[in-house]
Amino acid sequence: MRTRIFLTLMLLRTAALAAQDPQGGFVPVTEVPASEQLPSLPLVITAYAFVWAAFLFYAWTMWKKLGKVEQEITILSAQISKPRAKP
Amino acid sequence: MRKAFVPLLALAGLIFMTAPILIMRARYESTMGLVQKIFYFHMPPAMLMLLSAIFCGLISMLYLIKKRPVYDWIAFAAAELTVLYGAMAMVTGPLWARKAWGVWWVWDARLTMSLLLWMVFVSYLLLRRYGGPGSETLAAGLALFGMATSPFVYLSVNIWRTLHPLTSVVPTLPVDFAFALWYAFLGFLLLYIALMTMRVRIEEQRALVDQLYLESEE
C-alpha cells in the first residue's frame, strides 16, 4: 500500500515539474530580492552570544583557579603551623 | 582594589544587561541596517585590545627596569585580557563583515595587523606557559613589540586603503549611536578592571604558595 502511495506521489511530482515552462531568458534586477538576502539577525545574535560566552568562560576559569590556589594555601599553612615531632 | 571586585563585577553585569536596550533604541545605520548593531560589541573590545596591549607593554617595561614581581603579575593579566578582548573583536568583526562586505575576512592592513597583534600576545601566553624559568623576562620583551604595533593597528585605516571604516567614524557618531557605544564601552572597561583584579590576585596567591612550599621544606 505504502509503495503505491509513494509511486503515485512521485508520478504527480514528475507531472507537475513537466508542466512548468522552461526558463526562456534571464531578467536583470539591480538589487538582490529580499528573500535571497543574508539575514542579519543570526549574525547579530551570534556576535553578542559569543562575547557573553567568552566573558563567562574566562570568569569561570579564573574563579576555579583562584579556588584551587586558595585551597593549596590553606593546606600548606596548616602543614607549617602543625608542631613537628621531635627526633 | 580587591574589595571593589564584587561591586565592579555587579556594575559591569548591570551595564551588560541594559546595554542591548540602548543599542536597540539607537537608530539603524542607513546602508548596513540591523547588522551594524554588532558595532557596539565589536568596537569596545577592539579598542580595549589595543589599550591593553599598550598597558601590558608599559608595565612590562617597568618590570624590566625595576624587576618587581607585581609588575610581572599585572603584565601577565593584561596579556591574557588582550587575547580575550582580541578574540571577541576577531569573532564579532567577521560576523559583521559577512553581511556588510559580503566576505568573512579580507587581508587588508587593519585586519591583518590586528591578527598579528593578537598573535603576538598569544605567543606571550605560550611563552609564559611553556618557556620555563626566565620566560617572564623574554615575555616582557615580547610585550614591548606588541605595544609598538598597537598605534599602527589603530592608524592603519587612515594610512592604507582598507575596507574597514576609518577612525573618523567614532568621533562623528550621532548622539544615540555614541551614547549606546560609550555605555557598552563602560561595561567592557569595568569588566576589564574586575577581571584584571581577579587575575592579579591569582598570581599573588601563587607566589604565596611558592613561598609556603619553601617554608615547609625547610
Image (spheres, helix red, strand yellow):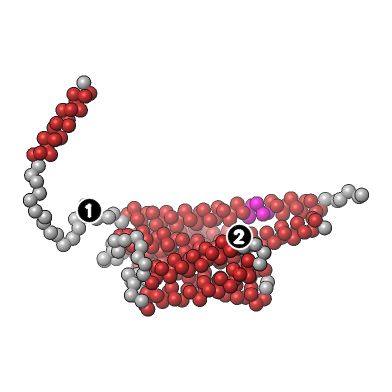
How far across and how far down the image is residue B24, in percent?
35, 59
**What residue lies at 28% left-to-right and 54% top-to-bottom?**
A39
**Mark 1 Cα within 10 Å, few/some/many (few <14, many 20+)?**
few
Quick one: SS at disc 2?
Answer: helix
Q: Is residue B24 magenta?
A: no
**Residue B209 in sight from this viewpoint:** yes
In the picture as drawn, the residue positioned furthest to the top comes out as: A1
- What stretch of residues is rendered in magenta? A66-70
How far across and how far down the image is residue B84, in percent?
50, 61
Q: Nearer the viewer, residue B41 or B147?
A: B147
Question: Which label sits in the foreground, 1 or 2?
Answer: 2
How far across and how far down the image is residue B148, in percent?
50, 76
Residue B4 lies, with reference to residue B172, above or below; the image says: above
In the picture as drawn, the residue positioned furthest to the right comes out as: A87
Residue B156, numbered label: none
What amino acid is found at the position of numbered circle 2 in the picture? Answer: Tyr
In the picture as drawn, the residue positioned furthest to the bottom comes out as: B159
Assign the magenta stretch its main secondary structure.
Answer: helix
